[in-house]
Image: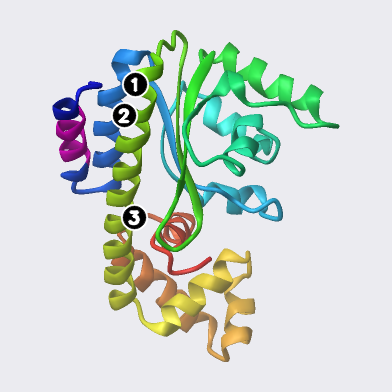
């Protein structure tokens, strides 16, 4: 894959994806020969984010069963040495090269040891500055990672194109969702995301409980969601609420 033609073909493959999931699925296929069998992609949550808000920064992930749930539930994203190095890097680096942070070394060793228990022994992280200035990344992992130095730059470049395509697709989806939802539906969803009841939302918006319920159900139908939690998740994903 290191040759120019191979890299060009890989870029074309990821940029032809019709959904972000398609894009990252194709990207993972491209890097799998290097032992990179797992992937997580998204933007970086701020240190002030709650665990639930941190999850909204996740765009795509392919990991061993149970690992992502544990990672998010334990709030590892805020102390993960790989994530911390992403904030200070502009190019791809191996997980094993991420330094430990003073004062939380034991927790960081725990995170990396638990990752190994799930078969994630090493990986390659690609920091990416997005068009709006926010920081994103694609991080690959696996149990038997073998990435020659000459392939790192190629993977870095292909991942940047993949993220660019994902941003484009997500923006198009956001514009479409905004066009479909009414301002009242967005307001109701925003309050629902804060954990407020129908009655509390009604008080905030000056409408009846029944009208609030109507707005939430209408938003669910438009976003193709199965229930309220799913509707809120889709609204976050589309950038309708933050």
Between disc 3 and disc 2, the foreground one is 2
* Place of residue 86 in the rendered image (x, y in percent of width and height, measured from the top left): 57, 39
Label 2: state its secondary structure: helix
Farthest bottom residue in view: 206
Label for residue 203?
none
Q: Which residue is mark 3?
A: 167
Q: Residue at x 28, y 32 (%)?
A: 27
Q: Which residue is mark 1?
A: 151
Q: Is residue 8 magenta?
A: yes
Q: How far apart are the two marked residues, 2 and 1, measured between alpha carbons?
A: 5 Å
Query: Cβ–Cβ below 8 Å for labels 3 and 1?
Result: no
Q: Residue at x 73, y 20 (%)?
A: 109
User: Based on the displayed image, in which of its 4 quarters is residue 40 positioned?
Assistant: top left
Label 3: state its secondary structure: helix
Sequence order check, earlier mark of 3 and 2: 2
- Lateral position of residue 61 relative to residue 13, left or right: right
* Place of residue 207 in the rendered image (x, y in percent of width and height, measured from the top left): 53, 89
Per the rendered image, the range of residues in magenta is 7-14
Q: Is residue 9 magenta?
A: yes
Depth order, front residue of 120/89: 89
- Lateral position of residue 194 relative to residue 180, left or right: right
Query: Cβ–Cβ below 8 Å for labels 2 and 1?
Result: yes
Q: How far apart are the two marked residues, 3 and 2, measured between alpha carbons?
A: 20 Å
Q: Which residue is mark 2?
A: 154
User: Based on the displayed image, in which of its 4 quarters is residue 103 positioned?
Assistant: top right
């Amino acid at each position: 894959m290191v040759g120019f033609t191979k890299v060009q073909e890989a870029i074309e493959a990821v940029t032809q994806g019709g959904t972000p999931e398609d894009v990252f699925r194709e990207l993972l296929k491209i890097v799998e020969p290097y032992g990179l069998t797992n992937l997580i992609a998204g933007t970086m949550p701020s240190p002030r984010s709650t665990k639930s808000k941190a999850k909204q920064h996740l765009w795509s992930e392919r990991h061993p069963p149970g690992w992502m749930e544990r990672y998010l539930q334990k709030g590892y994203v805020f102390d993960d040495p790989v994530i911390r190095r992403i904030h200070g890097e502009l190019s791809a680096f191996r997980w094993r090269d991420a330094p430990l942070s003073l004062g939380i070394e034991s927790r960081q060793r725990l995170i990396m040891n638990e990752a190994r228990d799930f078969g994630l022994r090493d990986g390659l992280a690609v920091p990416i500055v997005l068009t709006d200035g926010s920081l994103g990344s694609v991080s690959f992992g696996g149990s038997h990672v073998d990435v020659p130095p000459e392939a790192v730059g190629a993977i870095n470049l292909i991942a940047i194109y993949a993220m660019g395509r994902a941003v484009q697709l997500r923006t198009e989806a956001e514009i479409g969702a905004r066009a479909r939802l009414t301002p009242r539906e967005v307001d109701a969803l925003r309050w629902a995301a804060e954990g407020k009841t129908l009655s509390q939302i009604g008080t905030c918006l000056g409408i009846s409980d029944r009208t609030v319920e109507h707005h939430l159900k209408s938003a669910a139908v438009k976003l193709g969601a199965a229930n309220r939690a799913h509707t809120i998740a889709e609204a976050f994903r589309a950038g309708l609420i933050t």
